[in-house]
Amino acid sequence: SGVAEGRRALSAASRLTFDTSRIDPARDTVLLVTHQASRTGAPIHAAEVGHRLRTDLGLNVVSLLLMGGDIVEVFEACSDAVVGPLTYDEWHPVEAKFLIEKLVRVYDIAYAVVNRIDSRLVLEPLSLAHVPNVALVHEFPSYFPPRGSVGKSLEWATRIVFPAHIVANAVAEEYPNLANWPYAVLPQGALAPPKVRDAHADTSDEEARLQAAIGGGDGEKPFVVLGIGTVFIRKGVD
């Protein structure tokens, strides 16, 4: 009956690879969780955190990618092991429970850094596995209905870090119980986008298409409005 219902026969934890070949047993191991490996703000920030944990603090870094993207290779470079990426249909509390249990068992995780509130799926299983975790929250809670759900998820975090007071205040306004949890406000600063191999390095066709769209060949200087960024309702490109 499970086949007819479209259920998967195996969990994500059973299909993923858990490589330990580069793990140094003399060093502590930290789990770095990112909601995806796209070449966008939060994943770029996560990769930088992984780089600092590994080079500045001398830790083993295991990166868990909840989805794939263009900078998987960047996480491979800043990590001693990369687990994933998962697929979106594997974002389920039961999947998260089994996955975290296996990660803790295989890598003996000292603590976890959970980047972006989209990764909140792993906060509860980390706490239940007695793994201290730091939640890096970049987003306003209004992006994630229903009201109060972000604050409720953060109750599973050991520590919470916001990039600005306005973000912390917005979460506290929706979920006043946040006052009972320790949190810090630490601006993340500017980060250079990582360099990755571009499968579409030949941009001549795209340049020609844009030039045709802009026009201006009749001598008039065109007025150009250029939108750059992820096309999403809250990103402002529209």
Image: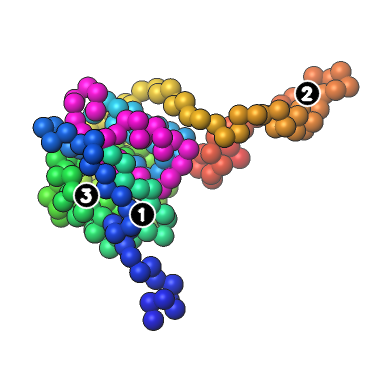
Q: Nearer the viewer, mark 1 or mark 3?
A: 3
Above or below for 119 versus 166: below
Q: Do the residues labelled 1 and 3 touch (CB within 8 Å)?
A: no
User: Dot 3, crowdedness within 10 Å: few (<14), some or many (≥20)?
Assistant: some
Farthest residue, direction bottom: 1
Question: Contact, CB < 8 Å: mark 3 with mark 2?
Answer: no
Residue 98 picture quarter: bottom left
Determine the residue positioned at 48% across, 38% down: 70
Residue under label 1, please give it: 147
Which one is nearer the viewer's eye here, 32 or 20? 20
- Residue 96: percent from left, percent from top: 28, 56
Alpha carbon distance from label 3 to label 2: 55 Å
The image quadrant of residue 25 is top left
- Residue of label 3: 103
Q: Name the residue under label 2.
A: 222
Crowd tier of the residue under label 1, counting other residues whose Cα lies within 10 Å: few below 14, some 14–19, many 20 or above:
some
Residue type at tag 3: Leu
Give residue 39's position: percent from left, percent from top.
47, 35
- Which range of residues does the magenta coloring cover? 54-80
The residue sitting at the right extreme is 218
**Is residue 141 in sight in this rendering?**
no
